[in-house]
Image (cartoon, grey):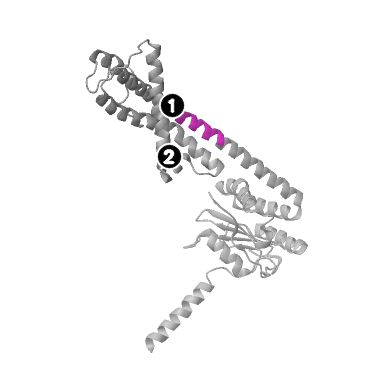
Amino acid sequence: MLKKIIFFFLLVTFYANAQDQYYELRDFVTDSAHIFTASQVLELNQRLVALEENTTNQLVIVTIEELGYDTIETYANALFNQNGIGQEGKDNGLLILFSELDREVRIEVGYGLEPYITDAVASRIIRNTMIPNFKEEAYFEGINEASNQLIEFLNNPEALDEFKQEIEDEESNNQLIGYIFLGFFLLIFVGVGGFFFYRSYKNIIEVFRGMLMGKLGVLPGLFMLIAGSLSSLFGLLFMLGPASTAFSILTSSQSIMGEIVDNPKLLLWVLLPFFGIAVIIAFIKLKISGKDDLNISWVKNDKSYFRKTFSSSGTHSFSSGSSSSGGSSSSFSGGGGSSGGGGSSGSW
């Protein structure tokens, strides 16, 4: 019985501590990290009181020393919902949460304001307005300028639309730069892969030509074809693999390599033209050289021909692969608003 009573009191104590984990807000500005002066707190609080009186929107600023075991997203969302920032039914609340020792900040947005203060808008305010000031330890300036922007966007839809257009333009420019870098790296892969493919495939053609002339034995030629095919296919993969992957990402379709893995029979349709074209080219070169008669040797090689055509000083590349090395003028009272986690976070 005693154990049950102790367990009950421990459970009640744990529940009470959980309820008291987040601040019960009394003002629009709660500076528990003590990063503002009394006059700065008063100035901010008066402006936020006026915002609620004019628009019913609530913007609350809270500074803390550290988050403890919470992430800033969890802390901000719980603090927001526990205090009901914004009006019930409108959910028109905003929270700026600043954690000094964690060097993190977040703008939490109520459901009702998410179409206006989008994640992208909140992220850009944090990135371009708050973080540069915070790096200089100008905490009031960063939060003050950010709150001015939020107030302006809530009061001036045209300014908000212009800001969103700037975000779209910035994202388009970043996307274009990304495509340029992607194209540059693809060219490198295509160039390197193309070089190895050309060297190896050229030797495959010579192997077939030597076999057709009887200068190269069929059995030794088969081993050379296996080695040369691996090197040539490696170059082809190195050349077409990244391009295929990039194409699949841009078109949201499966890459060619993925289709081959899913259906190995497709590899046969790759190898047939791979060797077929090499045989045709070898036969044409044979005809052009004026040697009409075909002569097949199963084992014996023409040593002079072999040294001249496949020596290490020539074009032979089968044996080597590639490797790379305060006080306030008015108190705050939440109206029952809620947030589902919309907003953005940043660190410096």
Task: Judge left or right: residue 300 versus residue 348.
Answer: left
Residue at disc 1, secondary structure: helix
**Which disc, if any, is residue 117?**
none
Kindly tell me whether residue 281 is visible in this rendering. yes
Overall secondary structure of the magenta section: helix
Inspect the magenta stretch and tell me whether residue 253 lies in it. no
**In magenta segment, residue 189:** yes
Residue drawn at point x = 73 percent, y = 55 percent? 154
Question: Residue at 41% of width from left, 29% of height from top?
Answer: 274
Q: Furthest residue to the front?
A: 293
Instruction: Relative to 68, say whether 275 is above or below.
Output: above
Tell me if 109 is positioned left or right of 257 in this view: right
Disc 2 crowd rating (10 Å Cα; few below 14, some 14-19, many 20+) is some
Q: What residue type is disc 1 on?
A: Gly
Q: Amino acid at mark 2?
A: Leu
Q: Secondary structure at mark 2?
A: helix
Which residue is at a point 34% across and 19% down the rendered structure image? Answer: 209
Q: Mark 2 = which residue? A: 266
Q: In front here: 258 or 141?
A: 258
**In the picture, which quadrant includes the N terminus?**
bottom left
Q: Residues within 10 Å of mark 1 (few under 14, many from 20)?
A: some
Residue extending furthest left? Answer: 300
Give the side of residue 336 with respect to residue 197, left or right: right
Residue 59 appearing in the image: no
First to last magenta residue range: 179-190
Residue placed furthest toward the right? 54
Asked where in the image residue 325 lies, by quadrant, the reply is top left
Report, in whole angstroms, how far the alpha carbon at label 1 lies from the one at label 2. 22 Å
Establish if 139 lies above or below 188. below
Which image quadrant for residue 165?
top right
State the residue in front, 35 or 153: 153
Q: Which residue is mark 1?
A: 194
